[in-house]
Image (cartoon, rainbow, N blue to C red):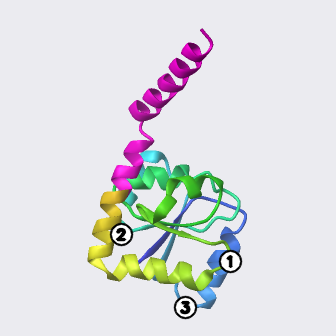
Amino acid sequence: AKFVIIGKGTYRSHLEKKTHDLGLDSKVIFTGFLPYEEMFALYRHAKAFVFASRTETQGYVGLEAMTLGLPVVALSGTGTNDLLHGDKGGFLIEQDDEKVFAEAVLKLMTDKATRATKSKQAVARAEEYSLDAMTEKLLRIYSTTIYAHK
């Protein structure tokens, strides 16, 4: 298995050093910033999407991964709570539970049945956030509001 870290952030040099110190250079790939097309190409080869950010918890990257059927393991946060409500499409982990986070990732990597179920759920959940679905939801809200004030 390979662990691919996409993006560039303030912790990259720390993570590269930690990777080297642990002797994992051959198992971890740091891509830096990637255009969407390249990022999605990598997603298509992945078994899971791991999102351990404590600050960027809006869930957009998780949603992007889910559209391609990738189950997500993410830390609990504002957007990720909505996206992974009920652990549909992946696993939602409390912020300070590293052991449970690691167990969830390993479950997706080793249990094909769980990964297949979570993958189907991921696609279904992503559909709930599609342009069509969100437009329909917004139109219902507008319609309800307009008729309520007549």
Cα gap from disc 3 to disc 2, whole angstroms = 23 Å
Q: Which quadrant: the N terminus?
A: bottom left
Residue at mark 2: 47
- Residue 71 versus residue 109 in the image, above or below: above
Q: Are the residues at dot 2 and dot 1 in contact (C-beta closer than 8 Å)?
A: no
Task: Indicate left or right for 127 with 30 as reference.
Answer: left
Residue 98 sits inside the magenta stretch: no
> Camera-side residue: 88 or 103?
88
Residue at mark 1: 96
SS state under label 2: loop
Residue at mark 3: 23
Name the spot of residue 81 as percent of width and height, x first: 58, 58
Q: Amino acid at mark 2?
A: Lys
Cα gap from disc 2 to disc 1, whole angstroms = 24 Å
Cα gap from disc 1 to disc 3, whole angstroms = 25 Å
Q: Which quadrant: the C terminus?
A: top right
Residue plotted at (63% across, 59% down): 8
Residue plotted at (57% across, 14% down): 146
Q: In the image, which is nearer the foreground, mark 3 or mark 2?
A: 2
Name the spot of residue 107 as percent of width and height, x first: 40, 80
SS state under label 1: loop
SS state under label 3: loop
Magenta region, residue range: 122-150
Q: Are the residues at dot 1 and dot 3 in contact (C-beta closer than 8 Å)?
A: no
